[in-house]
Amino acid sequence: MTLYDENNVFAKIIRGEIPSKKVYEDAFSLAFHDINPKAPIHVLIIPKIKVKTFQDFARDASPEEMKGFFNGMDHVLRILNIQGGYRIMANTGIHSGQEVDHFHLHILGGKHLGPMVCA
Ligand code: 5GP
């Protein structure tokens, strides 16, 4: 597991130290609107456990935490009810441009999103 910084922005949002525009929350996950949306719908969902990357989550989450997170994902997608489809992505590390070192999934939609990766 890579070192987790307790003071990253999303850890502060989970602790309620920074406000967020919440979409959904339960014991395992929290979803909120991205502060700088890249599409008409841009929501982030994060697990409440302290993990930095998707791989850390896959390795360190208990079966209950994993199930809880994906159950939260299902709730969020139902709430958003995005027409026309959506994209889910996770940036990891420098080449991806990951800004916040708490594992999160981006949910993007509300328009045609264009190519998956710009050349
Ligand atoms: P990353 O590049 O790490 O995959 O994505 C981090 C995302 O978090 C970015 O899209 C950025 O706009 C968003 N973000 C950064 N700080 C905040 C914040 O304080 N509140 C919210 N709601 N989103 C944030």
Image: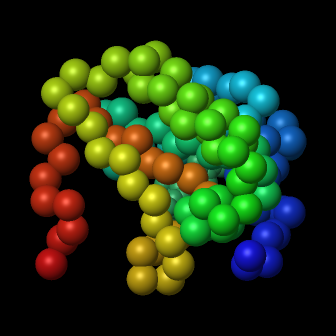
Give how far across and how far down residue 60 sits, in percent. 73, 62
Q: Quadrant of residue 100?
A: bottom right
Q: Is residue 39 visible?
A: no
Give how far across and how far down residue 50 sits, in percent. 78, 57
Extreme residue in the bottom direction? 95
Q: Quadrant of residue 118?
A: bottom left
Between 71 and 62, the residue placed more toward the observer is: 62
Residue at 42 percent across and 26 percent down: it is 77
Where 19 falls versus 2 (above or below)? above
Q: How is the image coloured?
A: rainbow
Extreme residue in the front direction? 63
Ligand 1 quadrant?
bottom right
Residue at 34 percent across and 42 percent down: it is 108
Q: Is residue 28 visible?
A: yes
Left or right: residue 4 compared with residue 76: right
Between 81 and 1, the residue placed more toward the observer is: 1
Give how far across and how far down residue 4 sits, in percent. 79, 70
Left or right: residue 71 compared with residue 19: left
Where 46 falls versus 25 (above or below)? below
Task: Give the quarter of the figure containing the N terminus.
Answer: bottom right
Residue at 20 percent across and 61 percent down: it is 116
Q: How many marks?
A: 0
Residue at 58 percent across and 68 percent down: it is 55
Between 50 and 111, the residue placed more toward the observer is: 50
Give how far across and how far down residue 62 sits, in percent. 74, 49
Where 24 falls versus 1 (above or below)? above
Task: Give the quarter of the figure containing the C terminus.
Answer: bottom left
